Amino acid sequence: MGTEFAEITLKTDHIVPEQKLWRGVLFNALDETMIGASDRKSSIYKIDSHNWIVNKGDDFEKVCYWGGYDPDNVTEKYTAAVKRGEIKFNERQVAWGKYYKQYLIYKKSKDTESKKYHRNRLEWLRKEVKQATTALISMIIVSAIA
């Protein structure tokens, strides 16, 4: 995210505790996008944090404002970091993201036919995860994943 972002965050003399709290939430999400591990839990954290930032939902905007940041500026700097290759994704991380998204749909399914369909889809996606490599994806991902 660059030195200017880090410089701003380190100057906390004039910041009230609540603002520090919301900055912590934002920094935690930014930190999670840097995860290099490809296990299920780490990949889901990484993808969720990435999507939270690039989708710029109401909760993201509130956290930014409450932390004293402009959400558009944060997203712009994050996107630039992705384009520079500072934030990377591999095939397995993206595959876990797709699997998790399908799992959430499966959990909400009510009728038997729907559950069966989504369970079969989960089994297929699980195979995709196992076959996915940990090689970095060369394309730049600046939109939501999965």
Image: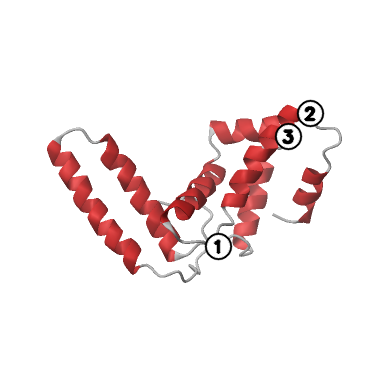
Kindly identify the residue that appears in the image at 61 percent across and 65 percent down. Answer: 85
Furthest toward the right, the residue is 13
Callout 3–callout 2 Cβ contact below 8 Å? yes
Q: Residue 16 shows which numbered tag? A: 2
Amino acid type indicated by mark 2 = Val
Height in image: 21 above or below 137? above
Q: Quadrant of residue 22?
A: top right
Tag 2 secondary structure: loop
Amino acid type indicated by mark 3 = Lys
How many angstroms separate mark 3 from mark 2 (CA)? Answer: 7 Å
Where in the figure is residue 23, as x and y percent of width and height?
Answer: 69, 38
Q: Nearer the viewer, mark 1 or mark 2?
A: 2
Q: Quadrant of residue 18?
A: top right
Kindly identify the residue that appears in the image at 28 percent across and 62 percent down. Answer: 127
Where in the figure is residue 52, as x and y percent of width and height?
Answer: 53, 42
Height in image: 72 above or below 50? above
How many angstroms separate mark 1 from mark 2 (CA)? Answer: 33 Å
Tag 1 secondary structure: loop
Left or right: 52 in relation to 40: right
How many angstroms separate mark 1 from mark 3 (CA)? Answer: 27 Å
How many residues crowd mark 3 within 10 Å: few (<14), some (14–19), many (20+)? some
Amino acid type indicated by mark 1 = Lys
Q: Residue 20 shows which numbered tag? A: 3
Tag 3 secondary structure: helix
First in sequence, mark 1 or 2: give its number: 2
Q: Please give the count of numbered marks on the rendered protein.
A: 3
How many residues crowd mark 2 within 10 Å: few (<14), some (14–19), many (20+)? few
Kindly identify the residue that appears in the image at 62 percent across and 51 percent down. Answer: 31
Left or right: 33 in relation to 38: right
Q: Residue 88 shows which numbered tag? A: 1
Q: Quadrant of residue 13?
A: top right
